[in-house]
Amino acid sequence: MSVIIEAKNISVNYGSSEVLKNISFGIEKGDFVGLAGSNGAGKTTLVKALLGLLPLTTGEIELFGENEERFNDWQKIGYLPQKFSTINALFPATVEEVIALGLLSTKKFPKRITATDRKKARALMAELGITEQAKKMLSELSGGQQQKVLLGRALISEPEVLIFDEPSTALDPNSRDAFFKLLQTLNQEKGITIILITHDTGYIGKYANKLLYIDRELIYFGKFSEFCADHKMKSYFGEHEQHIICHQHN
């Protein structure tokens, strides 16, 4: 498999404070990566660095074989932040319109939603199981339904990579399971590469094939199956914690 996201000895500072230190890894096309770590470990900082939203202190990032500073194909990467600041739940737009808005970034001026765009949005809503909500406002939906709408908004431009920042925070257990199974289907059937920030290292192992664990520095990157057999990780996490993580994966 080809490496499509590569971090090479990257460090990130906030002022004089070093938030990430000398981190290297390569994510391959088709990976489903659980990005885990304790609070303050630098998970969101790492994602923002990958998206070019934060400058690197040292090192470099390559996206699809190109240095991030020269990379312009951003429609290949969809990002859903933890707090959906990109759109207000009270924004006066229907579900269909919100999803279609995801195409604006691919258009040249004048940026307009066309009949073809609406048709594409309706097809995607059918795929996500939210056709009945097409004419509803985002504010009328449950948390799980809103999550699907915002996923649809990211998917409509047909990205090759989807990055999530703790997408299950506001979901009940049933909605969380359904949403993660949907992501697993997108990963396995459409080959979309997924990076998902989570605080629940064990739970993500039910769906992800690789674990990227950081604590300002890289602690582990690789397959869950290899993590479970790694004596160094047993020493770092403790046998009980490693067992909990591996039990969910297995």
Image (cartoon, helix red, strand yellow):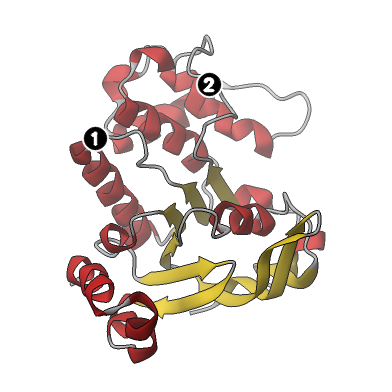
Asked whether, in this view, residue 127 is left or right of residue 244, the answer is right
Q: Which mark is residue 172?
A: 1
Q: Residues within 10 Å of mark 2 (few under 14, many from 20)?
A: few
Report x, y in % for residue 28: 50, 73
Report x, y in % for residue 239: 25, 80
Report x, y in % for residue 160: 52, 57
On screen, residue 66 above or below 177: below
Mark 2 is on which residue type?
A: Ala
Foreground mark, 1 or 2? 1
For the point 22% across and 46% down, the residue is 177
Mark earlier in primary sequence (1, 2): 2
Classify mark 2: helix, strand or loop: helix
Mark 1 is on which residue type?
A: Asp
Classify mark 1: helix, strand or loop: loop
On screen, residue 132 above or below 155: above
Q: Residues within 10 Å of mark 1 (few under 14, many from 20)?
A: few
Marks 1 and 2 sit apart, C-alpha to C-alpha, by 36 Å
